[in-house]
Image (cartoon, rainbow, N blue to C red):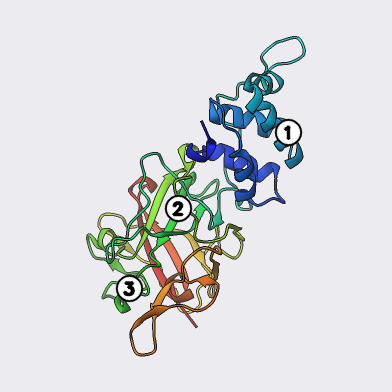
Amino acid sequence: MSTGRTSLPADVVAKIAADFPHERLDSVLAILDEYKGVEGPRIIRCIIHLASGSTNQLLDLIANANADYRNVVYWAEYDRDDRRIRDFTQPFAVASAGPGDVSLSFVGGRPLLSSGAEIPTCALCSERMCFFFQVALPVDHRWQGALVAVFQCVSCCSEDALIPEMPSVALSGAEIPPGFLTRYQTNFRIVVSDAPTAQVRNDYHPLIQHASIDPSAWRIGAEPQWLLDDEAPGSYESFKDPVFLFQVPLGMAFIRCPDAPPQKTMGLEGEVVDADGPQYELFLSNASYFFGFGAPAAGRIYVVTQTE
């Protein structure tokens, strides 16, 4: 079974980020994809444990596993007296994300999603959306353990959907109309997953190059830094206490992969054209502030944008 066709659990991705801090996640995943044997997640955990952060060791161990995977299981799980001291059928004991832990927060590459979650399609053109980024909410946050993934369509463009729709009320302390959060995501989609059970979606072809996220600039586990006035919402339906999740910095550029198509944008005369440049934009590159209502599993997320 090739790991390229098997989703890797979030604990494996977090362990890769911790053990290989100077390597691109996609590069390490590509190396691991060379393992073609059975018991994918277990053997991959054994290989990562034995590699101790060395890509050269990683390659040697994969070659050994392809020859006989039982060798790496024995080396990883048993001591010299043949006593089993580890069990890599179980997840790595990776600590929950803290404010400075970016192992599960990143731009581009492939998203981690809960089992059964679909890659979203655009309500305007029906094309598959592009994965832009995901953020892991840290320890002591009210949404601790939630992964928030953001997708946007790059295949179409509408003047009415360049930024998220805003409710027709004063934005500061806004009472968001009932049902608004379920209908305003037309050409973008926010998918919330549970970090411990999320898996890498290897069926998704990346359009944006993988890069780390600066938790300080994105205000993960902190308070928003408003460009203009405070426009935090007040309530939504029966939920009166929104929680700030994170913000996307003003001017954030998402560098597209070499084989990714240009993003559709609006021309000077209102026509749809291909955007220039090597990057994609999210919400016209405005600063974007994300707030959650209620439990993470319900995915009630409100986005407000600001620009200078």
In the rendered structure, are the residues bearing label 2 and label 1 in contact, judged by CB atoms less than 8 Å apart? no
Q: In this view, does 205 lie above or below 13?
A: below
Horizontal relation, residue 71 to residue 151: left or right: right
Asked if labels 1 and 3 touch by Cβ distance under 8 angstroms, the answer is no
Q: Mark 1 points at which residue?
A: 60
The answer for how far apart the CA atoms under marks 3 and 2 are is 21 Å
Q: What element carries label 1?
A: helix
Which residue was labeled with disc 2?
Answer: 148
Residue 43 appears at what percent x and percent y?
A: 60, 27
Q: Is residue 41 visible?
A: yes
Query: In the orientation shown, which residue stands out farthest toward the bottom?
Result: 269
Residue 130 in picture, x, y percent from top left: 43, 60
Vertical relation: 200 (above or below) 246: above
Residue nearer the viewer, 68 or 12? 68
User: Residue 296: x, y in percent?
Assistant: 39, 48
Name the residue that disc number 3 marks: 161
Q: Is residue 40 above or below residue 198?
A: above
Say whether disc 2 or disc 1 marks the residue closer to the N-terminus.
Answer: 1
| Residue 94 horizontal side relative to residue 262, left or right | right
Which residue: 76% across, 40% down?
56
What is the three-letter code of the residue carrying label 3? Ala
Of marks 3 and 1, which one's residue comes earlier in the chain?
Answer: 1
Q: Distance between the Cα atoms at labels 3 and 1?
A: 50 Å
Label 3 element class: helix
Up-down relation of residue 304 to residue 99 (above or below): below
Q: Residue furthest front?
A: 67
Of circles 3 and 1, the one toward us is 1
Q: Disc 1 marks which amino acid?
A: Asp
Query: Which amino acid lies under the numbered mark 2 shown in the image of this protein?
Result: Val
- Crowding around mark 3 (Cα neighbors within 10 Å: few <14, some 14 to 19, many 20+) is some
The residue sitting at 45% across, 53% down in the picture is 148
Q: Label 1: few (<14), some or many (≥20) within 10 Å?
A: few
